[in-house]
Image: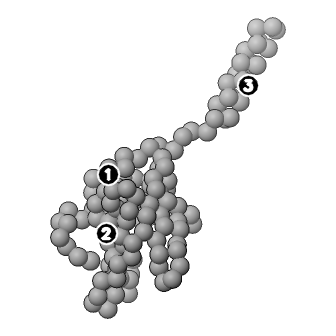
Amino acid sequence: MGHLLRSMVAVVAVGWIGTATPAADPAIDAKKLLGRWELPKAGPNDPPMIIEMMDKGKLTMSIMVQGATERRDGSYKLTGNKLEIEIALMGQTLKETLTIVKLTDTELVTKDSKGIEETLKRIKDQKKSP
């Protein structure tokens, strides 16, 4: 009986310790974020959008509107797999925290606070405009 009781206590203790420390978010290689990323159009009326991630947490968002490119500067911070973005748009500072679901050399998949996933494709030719 004593051995069975000690075994049960050990199982409960291990289970309690396991649930007390949540798994850490997987780290993302920040260098893979650098570059230009295109967000494909969701619909026929959506403008093309390009996001350029630069060193030191700087970003630029370019949107093609009525034949002209609108640029907005912003910043980002990467912590684990959380990407905090801040950008000035229409007189307001917009903030969003995205979860990076997948990051490869050619694809960036993020999920926003509403659970919506978006897939961005890396632009290889740095000279192209949106």
Amino acid, disc 2: Glu
Near-viewer residue (60 or 111): 60
Callout 1 secondary element: helix
Q: Quadrant of residue 58?
A: bottom left
* Image coordinates for residue 45, horizontal then vertical, percent: 38, 87
Amino acid, disc 1: Lys
Q: CA distance from mark 3 to mark 2?
A: 49 Å
* Image coordinates for residue 49, horizontal then vertical, percent: 34, 75
> Which residue is disc 3 drawn over?
12
Amino acid, disc 3: Val
Q: CA distance from mark 3 to mark 1?
A: 42 Å
Please give the name of the residue rendered at 47% of the width and 43% of the height, measured from the top-left corner: 26
Q: Is residue 79 above or below residue 121?
A: above
Callout 2 secondary element: strand
Mark 1 or mark 2, which is nearer to you? 1
Q: Along the horizontal axis of the image, is 104 left or right of 127?
A: right
Res. 49 in view: no
Q: Is residue 3 above or below residue 65?
A: above
Q: Quadrant of residue 44?
A: bottom left
Please give the name of the residue rendered at 82% of the width and 8% of the height, measured from the top-left corner: 1
> Which residue is disc 1 drawn over?
32
Tell me if mark 1 has few (under 14), some (14-19) or many (20+) residues whose alpha carbon lies within 10 angstroms of its own. some
> Which residue is disc 2 drawn over?
38
